[in-house]
Each structure stands twice: as C-alpha cells, then as structure tokens.
C-alpha cells in the first residue's frame, strides 16, 4: 500500500530544502542539511516511534512490523532530542562546537518542517476552525481555516529571519525551538482533537518552550560576559 | 560559521527513505460510492461480536443506522495498521458514542483472533465477523484497514484507506454531525 500524500510531502520537503539552500539561505561553503541531517533524521524517527510505542502500547515491541508503522504515532520531541544528540556527537567527532553545528542547519531544518506542514494539502487535508476564508476538506463540509498552512508560512519566515539576522548559535537554536514548541502547542488546540484537556504533547511542548527560554537566557549571559571580558 | 562535514553517500539515504515510506504507509485511494439496499435492520448491541451471514445484513444495519452519523471500520487482527488505529477508534467511540454510531467489521480473519483483538483494545462498539470478506467485496475495498463515514441520511461522505489519523477522523465526524 502506498501513502501517496505522505510520499508527496516528503518529496516536497527534499525539493524545497534543496532549493532554499541553493538560492535563498546564506550558508556558503557549507554541506547541505540533506547530507548532514539524513542520519540524525532517521535516528530521530526511529527513537520517536519507539518512544511512542513504549508509552502507548509496549506490547507492540513484540511485533517488529508494528514498530515500522509511523502513522501509528510518534513522539515528536523525543525524536528531536535524539536527532540533536546525534548531530552533537557528529560535531564532536568533527571537532566543531555542537551549538554552532546545530545552529548552522536550523534554517534549513525549519524550512523542511514548514514545507511538511504546508503539504497538508496533499496528505489528509488542512484542518482548523470553521471559517469563511479557508479550504473545503476532501470529504466536503464547511470551509476550514488551514492552520497548518499558516504555521508553515510562519515557520518559513522564522527560518529566513534566523538565517539573515541571527549569528549567535544559542539564540538561533533557542528561537527555533521555542517557535516550534509554541506553534505545536497552538495547533494542538486549534486542530481537530479527541482529548479536551492538556495532552502529553502539550506538556512536552511547554517544557521545550521553557528549555528554549533557558537556552536563550544562558546564551545572552555568555554573550554579555564575553563582551565585558573583551572590554577589560 | 563552522563547516559541516559532507556525507559520502547521499543517494541510498533517499532511496531507503522513499522505499520505507512506500512500504510502511497506507493507501489514500477513494472507492466508488456505496449505496446500501434492502430493509433496514436493528443496530447490534455495543458489546456484540456477531457472525455476518451475508452482506445484505451489513446493508440493512447501515440503513437502520440512519438518523445518526455512522463510522464503519473494516479491520483484521493480522493487520498492523489496524492495531495501530484501534485505540484511536475506541477513544473516538467513547467521546462521540452518544451522537455517532460506530461499527467494526472483522474481515478475512479467524473468530478467536478477532475476539481477542476486540478484548485487547476494549472496543466499545459492535463488531461483525465476516470470515469470507463479503463486506470488503461489497464495498470494493482496496486495503486494510478502511474507514467509512456516513452522514445522518446514510450517505457515504468519506473513505479512508489505511490507518486514519485523529485529525481526519474528528474532522470527518464533526462534518457528518452538521
């Protein structure tokens, strides 16, 4: 069975990220995120899926085929953490500052996430609150505000802005993490859902947003301290 | 900015990713419209796991369910994506159970495995046991699992082949309830 929508989304991500790195993002002389990010991405997906299985239905561990069903659910932030750890390890091996290494690919990674979000039009559909301005779902009904398209456009702009104006690695990573965390938190409330209270996803996003704030605060303190030292 | 080490091999990663996506995903094809025929029949009890004698009974149950939206999920215990989506359907049935009917069809399976599946996932809605796969044949189903959503008038408004996501299911149910 082939999920054409998911396949089309992934192809769109690869094409857009490649095009963005080539013509828009300012990273001359750098290796493509499609090269350096491939292994962390795979590691991230595997860890995200395993974490979801461990939390929701550990009995699936006895069925390797069920572990491969990504549509069965993934833990997003666990995957991001695993991918980041893999990148940091790669950076250490290359004798490069892991924060700088990570910050260098943040704009392209955010572009990929934004593209995947916008590609909801070719997957299950773009949902949101009922709105006079919006898209009619594939199964008909009233127009729905395409929240994920808005999220994609916003994160695409954040990626471009970080690439253009932000040169501090910790600030770049902190802003990217908090942007994604806040966006995921808001979309969790705006998109169709079964649960009415706070979910695990939302608690995780809140935690990541706080962590990103700490990274920003720590980065700011390090920057100020260096400036003070430089002046002395 | 630091230089990033270029990976030596790029093509195989893309090939593996694409192949994995193809193999591990569900279909998203639509099926021709289904128009049930025959006399309407009573909806089974919530904890029912009954043998389906003929597809005519399935048509009758669908017709008898008019007045409320109906979600029909065709599954099998040997189907991985069916196991992945079963908890979601159970949660949806518990949330919308008073306003939406849910019906499962265990097709091309064996009786004991089907019963264990229903017990394991504590499905709170009736399931029909269709050993010969009459319902998939009647619905021109293209793959397991498949979820059909009918509106209050009994019109088929949505077909999802492969595992259904929470957003899609909730959006379809809420559309069917309008």
Image (tube, rainbow, N blue to C red):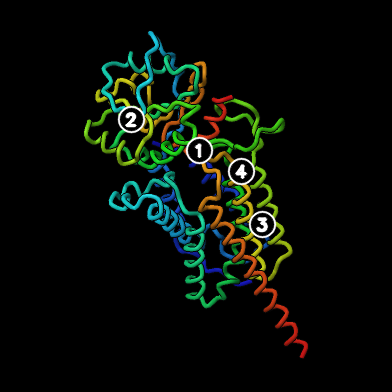
> Where the N terminus of chain B falls, by quadrant?
bottom right
Q: Residue at x 31, y 27 (%)?
A: B48
Q: Residue at x 38, y 52 (%)?
A: A53
State the residue at coordinates (51%, 16%). Answer: B153
Place of residue B114 in the rendered image (x, y in percent of width and height, measured from the top left):
27, 34
Of A212 and A231, the residue lying toward us: A212
State whether discs 1 and 4 lie on one chain: yes
- SS label for mark 3: helix
Decide which of B100, B149 is in the foreground and name it. Answer: B100
- Circle nearer the N terminus (1, 4): 1
**Label 1 vs 3, first from the N-terminus:** 1
Residue A159, label in figure: 3
Q: Mark 1 to mark 2: distance in Å? A: 35 Å
Q: Which mark is residue A118?
A: 4
Q: Is residue A25 visible?
A: yes
Image quadrant in which you'd find residue A39: bottom left
The circle drawn on residue B46 is: none
Question: Mark on residue A5?
Answer: 1
- Mark 1, Cα crowd under 10 Å, few <14 / some 14-19 / many 20+, is many
For the residue carrying disc 2, how many other residues have a C-alpha within 10 Å: few (<14), some (14-19), or many (20+)?
some
Front position among marks 3 and 2: 2
In the rendered structure, the answer to whether residue A21 lies left or right of residue A67 reads: right
Label 4 chain ID: A
Query: Left or right: where does residue B67 sit relative to residue B103?
Result: right
Q: Which residue is mark 2?
A: B47
């Amino acid at each position: 069975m082939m999920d054409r929508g998911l396949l089309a989304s992934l192809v769109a991500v690869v094409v857009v990220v490649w095009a963005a790195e080539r013509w828009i993002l300012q990273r001359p002389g750098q290796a493509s995120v499609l090269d350096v990010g491939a292994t962390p991405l795979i590691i991230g997906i595997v860890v995200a899926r395993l974490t979801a299985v461990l939390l929701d239905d550990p009995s699936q561990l006895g069925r390797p085929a069920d572990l491969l069903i990504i549509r069965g659910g993934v833990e997003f932030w666990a995957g991001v953490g695993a991918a980041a750890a893999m990148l940091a390890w790669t950076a250490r091996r290359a004798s490069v500052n892991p924060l700088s290494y990570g910050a260098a690919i943040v704009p392209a990674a955010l572009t990929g996430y934004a593209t995947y979000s916008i590609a909801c039009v070719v997957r299950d559909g773009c949902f949101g609150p009922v709105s006079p301005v919006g898209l009619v779902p594939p199964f008909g009904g009233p127009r729905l505000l395409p929240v994920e398209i808005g999220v994609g456009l916003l994160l695409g702009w954040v990626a471009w802005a970080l690439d253009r104006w932000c040169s501090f690695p910790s600030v770049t990573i902190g802003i990217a993490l908090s942007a994604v965390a806040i966006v995921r938190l808001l979309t969790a409330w705006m998109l169709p859902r079964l649960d009415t209270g706070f979910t695990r996803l939302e608690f995780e996003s809140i935690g990541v947003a706080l962590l990103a704030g700490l990274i920003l605060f720590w980065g700011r303190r390090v920057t100020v301290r260096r400036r003070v030292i430089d002046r002395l | 900015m630091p230089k990033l080490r270029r990976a030596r091999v790029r093509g195989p990663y893309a090939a593996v990713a694409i192949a994995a996506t193809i193999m591990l995903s569900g279909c998203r094809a639509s099926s021709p419209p289904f128009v049930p025929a025959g006399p309407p029949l009573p909806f089974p009890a919530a904890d029912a796991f009954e043998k389906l004698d003929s597809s005519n009974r399935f048509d009758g149950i669908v017709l008898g369910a008019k007045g409320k939206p109906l979600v029909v999920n065709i599954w099998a215990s040997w189907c991985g994506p069916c196991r992945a989506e079963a908890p979601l359907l159970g949660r949806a049935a518990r949330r919308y159970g008073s306003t939406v009917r849910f019906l499962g069809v265990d097709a091309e399976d064996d009786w004991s495995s089907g019963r264990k599946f229903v017990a394991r996932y504590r499905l709170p809605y009736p399931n029909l046991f269709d050993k010969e796969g009459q319902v998939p044949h009647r619905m021109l189903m293209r793959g397991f699992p498949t979820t059909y959503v009918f509106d209050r008038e009994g019109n088929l408004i949505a077909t999802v082949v492969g595992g259904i996501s929470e957003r899609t299911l909730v959006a379809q149910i809420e559309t069917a309830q309008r």
